[in-house]
Image (cartoon, rainbow, N blue to C red):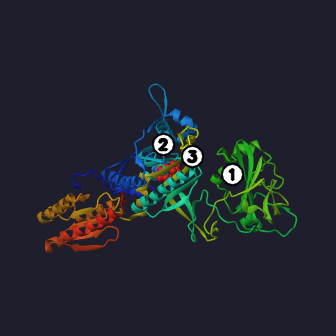
Amino acid sequence: MKQSSAFIPTLKDSPADAEVASHRLLVRAGFMRRVASGIYELLPLGARVVRNIERIVREEMNAAGAQEVILPIMQPRELWEESGRWSKYGPEMMRLKDRADRDFGLGPTHEEVITDLVRSNVSSWRDLPLNLYQIGDKFRDEMRPRFGLLRGREFIMKDGYSFDRDEEGMRRSYQAMYDAYGRIFTRSGCTWRAVEADTGLIGGDVSHEFMVPAAVGEDDIAYCEGCDYAANVTLATFKRAEPLRGEGKAAEKVHTPEKRTIEEVSSFLGLGPDRFIKCLMFLVEDKPVAVLVPGDREANETKLERVLGTDEFRLFIEDDWKRFPSYLQGFVGPVGLQAAEVIADVALAGAGGMVCGANEEDYHLAGVDEGRDFTAGRFEDITSAREGDVCPRCSGTLRIEAGIEVGQVFQLGLKYSEPMRCYYDDEDGVSRPMVMGTYGIGVTRLMSAIIEQHHDERGMLWPLAVAPALLHILPLNYEREERRSAARELYERCQERGWEVLLDDREESAGVKFADADLIGIPYRAVVGKGYDEDGTIELQVRTTGEKNKMDMDSLMGLLQQAVDTLADERPHVS
Ligand code: ATP
Ligand code: MG
């Protein structure tokens, strides 16, 4: 690729809407452009990175026994009705009608289509297990598209689906995908962590997310310092400390005029927030439910959804307070409370000497003991783990870090095969539902995640395996004939070996060339400048470390060949 003719529209300034480094740098370095909110074009350099990631994904998927297919983006409503997701997916699914007024959805994921394909074409145990994947465009009308490719509305995903005879087979397929994912992210140059995850709209029982730790990550991960426990904070659990105890005195009413929040009452009474019981009112399937958590903790809505067994719930809003005037906003407490259900966090079982709302304007109750003064219908794990909590497995210390979810794997079980009647005839002649798994990687999100982990103030620092090119050739003062012909010779030699290289054949100043090269972030750089005039040497620079070494062209080719060989060693060896 020659820079004078390549389509690399770099920019001096960052786009106004770019809040994170990867978004800023991809636009500034001419890798991508925005078409509409959450919808982007990938220009030649961006497309190369995506193709490199896809190549790694393909190699690992194929080596793990998965077969590539290409599925339609446009999918008929009928299939989505069968799984029940036509209504469940809600506004996140992009929908359209054809000329005959038939409904279609643009695939946010492809469980329905693939299950239909397999049920119609696979009927014998002899054809299982089967693992199919594709790499293609997905559409999700996200509530808040942002951070460039990290949360787009149209994006590239690798999605795969496994079909097995039984649970054990499904677990084997799952493990094979889990292992392949680890290799994919390592080969892409990321540090990553696999964490226990919630199954959300996709469904199923067991799931892991692959997280790339990065400050801009929208997920919080709890992980243990002492063992390999790691889980998304939406479901991470932790060992509760021994409950606080009271002094055995009767509960007493205290006047707390105008003090409604935990902070206000806590500083008014001079008691730590852990002494308080937060009583949150939720409307659950149209009924009032009280949720009790320690005053220094937050209720975790994902955990609540599991405990409630429905996603139809919300924290009381103004209308609900009006509709149920017996609950006094700011003074609700569990003592004598009437509600459809009272659910408390496990930390409150046996707690004593606590403070809570008195269900009376301007009053709280102090010295309240669970068991004596109130109890809950259920004690459940409904609060979020936080930094410093105790690991549920080994009693080590939990840490919290932000991460970008680049992939997720799910054990689906019969979630789709049962309602969609994806059955096979088993060896014993009995017809059984196939046991499924589903596996996704956000290819374009991964590209951004890589940048979040690999950039500096001057630009991107591409890991070799996914870089848009191996080498950036920078002849300084290109008008000088000897330098120009040396640069061209190097360019041609690289091309003969099939390497991607970028030759900066523009008649720009050294400053401009270096600044653009830093921004684009190709791992190796060959500077053909003064050294070449003096003794025929070229300076090989490493973008990540800033390391510089002078050498002749043959040695340079030798070094690059070594780098290419090392990379090739990482590829799976398929027999
Ligand atoms: P999120 O929680 O971030 O919305 P998700 O859990 O809904 O993602 P999955 O259904 O698990 O996503 O999709 C598989 C992968 O696709 C994700 O792990 C992620 O890498 C990628 N992905 C999902 N949504 C987007 C998006 N809006 N833009 C880019 N990549 C996405
Ligand atoms: Mg996910």
- Other-residue count near label 1 (Cα within 10 Å), few / some / many at <14 / 14–19 / ≥20: some
Residue at 69% x, 58% y: name it: 381
Is residue 540 shown to the viewer in this render? yes
Quarter where residue 417 is shown? top right
* Badge 1 element: helix
Which image quarter is the C terminus in? bottom left
Amino acid tagged 1: Val
- State the image coordinates of residue 450 (x, y, percent, origin top left): 41, 60
Establish whether ligand 1 lies closer than 8 Å to the Cβ of label 3: yes
In this view, which residue lies farthest toward the left? 481
Above or below, 415 relative to 172: above
Question: How far, Cα to Cα, is label 3 from label 2?
Answer: 13 Å
- State the image coordinates of residue 347 (x, y, percent, origin top left): 73, 63
Residue where numbered disc 3 is placed? 201
Q: Which mark is residue 358?
A: none
Which image quarter is the N terminus in? bottom left
* Badge 3 element: loop
- Other-residue count near label 3 (Cα within 10 Å), few / some / many at <14 / 14–19 / ≥20: few
Residue where numbered disc 1 is placed? 307
Question: How far, Cα to Cα, is label 2 from label 1?
Answer: 28 Å
Residue where numbered disc 2 is placed? 110
Q: Earlier in the sequence, mark 3 or mark 2?
A: 2
- State the image coordinates of residue 224 (x, y, percent, origin top left): 58, 68
In this view, which residue lies farthest toward the right? 250
